[in-house]
Amino acid sequence: MSRTVIRGGLVITASDEIHADVLVEGGRIAALAAHGTDAAESWSADRTIDATGKYVIPGGVDGHTHMEMPFGGTYAADTFETGTRAAAWGGTTTIVDFAIQSVGKSLREGLDAWYAKADGNCAIDYAFHMILADVNPSSLKEMDRLVAEGVTSFKLFMAYPGVFYSDDGQILRAMQQASGNGGLIMMHAENGIAIDVLVEQALAAGRTDPRYHGDVRKVALEAEATHRAIQLARVAGSPLYVVHVSADEAVQEIAAARHKGLPVFGETCPQYLFLSTDNLAEPDFEGAKYVCSTPLRPKEHQETLWRGLRNNELQVVSTDHCPFCFSGQKEMGRGDFSKIPNGMPGVEHRMDLLHQAVVDGHITRRRWIEIACASPARMFGLYPKKGTIAPGADADIVIYDPHAEQTLSAETHHMNVDYSAYEGKRITGQVETVLSRGELVVEGRKFTGRAGHGMYTPRATSQYLD
């Protein structure tokens, strides 16, 4: 059984910052001891990693990715192999991806298809949520079976009529089922029926550029759907997790529900914290790179999102990583913004961008680890195996250099996509070394991992509901 000691770093978790050495044995964290003490000095190891002047943090948990996802006649550009490799480069050691039920098919068929895509291909550990696209008596029964095997969260869509859309009755039934089986309902909260009317009207009026994608998906329609989802969950006695919250009014709806003591949670993503409608309006169709749903908002929404993260109105930052190349994929929407595949690359840069938020004074170091590691692990039933540095936890550990400077660029990133949403952005902080279950997957800025190292990880129910 191999032993690794990480010496001299500042160990940061959601609750503590301590100068400690970390002993890793058999893929797990065996012990922590104050640096320089007899206990720490007595450890022998096959490998010693010097973390002096660096942070020692838990591997990131990205609770919202879409590898190989079919959308609008094409597929997300990252496979489970390329996407998890890029995640590792960026200090993320666990992803929770979305298996998709097709209309007319069972949940089991959708889940099995995603098991087959991921099995043997992942560089880091992975788990699945289930997208419910066809709520009916048999899929409702199947939800119970999936919870029992460790797929404990179910995503529904108030958007995309004719594709993923569920009406209020279907949503209520799924929520009632989840309230009985312990599952967590995840919601894409946008009023898709109304949005489709606005899309049709915009195109008829000749408003076809990417910026109109943001224009038709109005803040009020995100807020309305968020409010409706909360009330339906309240009626069903079900918890609710609202994905990719982008707008101030939606944050206010979540905050109001939480102030009433309801089990309502919210996630935002780096694109809403760092990008805006200015990007969607970039000329020469460049704005297509930034088409995602919910859409980017005017800059003034960013402060509400940061405040929501600081005061725990929002609990998690995930990426909603769903990359489509500009060439040949995003270009499908030239002359019709509604045909631009919705999604952006991000799995590689979440940890770094959130460290930049620490540097910029938006959040503390511990809150960085909380929203990127511990909270998603707790939310999705993976804690304390994932999301922290403590004896017994998986040795998913990142040695992070808080002083290194880097410039984000498509030239240097490892995601399988031909552009960077953050091209030319200079940030402070960089991942240096990454261990996944004690194995080096990135060592001194060199990838040393392999497809197939990553293991499927069944999940418990949300630990915020215990």
Image (tube, rainbow, N blue to C red):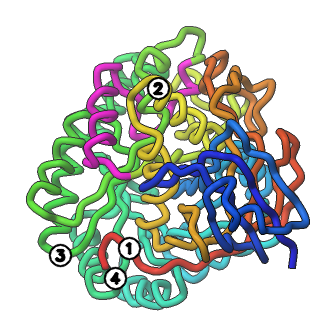
Residue annotated with mark 3: 236
Real-space Cα separation, disc 3 to disc 2, in angstroms: 35 Å
Across and down, in percent, residue 55 comes to 63, 43
Q: Nearer the viewer, mark 3 or mark 2?
A: 2
Real-space Cα separation, disc 4 to disc 1, in angstroms: 10 Å
How many other residues sit within 10 Å of disc 3, few (<14), some (14-19) or many (≥20)?
A: some
Residue annotated with mark 2: 274
Q: What element carries label 2?
A: helix
Asked whether the viewer can see residue 222, the reply is yes
Real-space Cα separation, disc 1 to disc 3, in angstroms: 20 Å
Q: Nearer the viewer, residue 120 or 214?
A: 120
Query: Could you tell which of marks 4 and 2 lies nearer the N-terminus?
Result: 4
Real-space Cα separation, disc 3 to disc 4, in angstroms: 12 Å
How many other residues sit within 10 Å of disc 2, few (<14), some (14-19) or many (≥20)?
A: some
Query: Could you tell which of marks 4 and 1 lies nearer the N-terminus?
Result: 4
Identify the residue at horizontal 17%, vertical 56% (top origin). 258
Q: Which amino acid does label 4 sit on?
A: Gly
Residue annotated with mark 1: 463
Real-space Cα separation, disc 4 to disc 2, in angstroms: 34 Å
Q: Which of marks 4 and 1 is in front?
A: 1
The N terminus - image quarter:
bottom right
Residue annotated with mark 4: 182
Residue 174 vertical position relative to residue 358 in the rendered view, above or below: below
Q: Which of 77 and 41 is in front in this view?
A: 41
**Is 298 colored magenta in this rendering?**
yes
Identify the residue at horizontal 44%, vertical 46% (top origin). 366
Query: Could you tell which of marks 1 and 2 lies nearer the N-terminus?
Result: 2
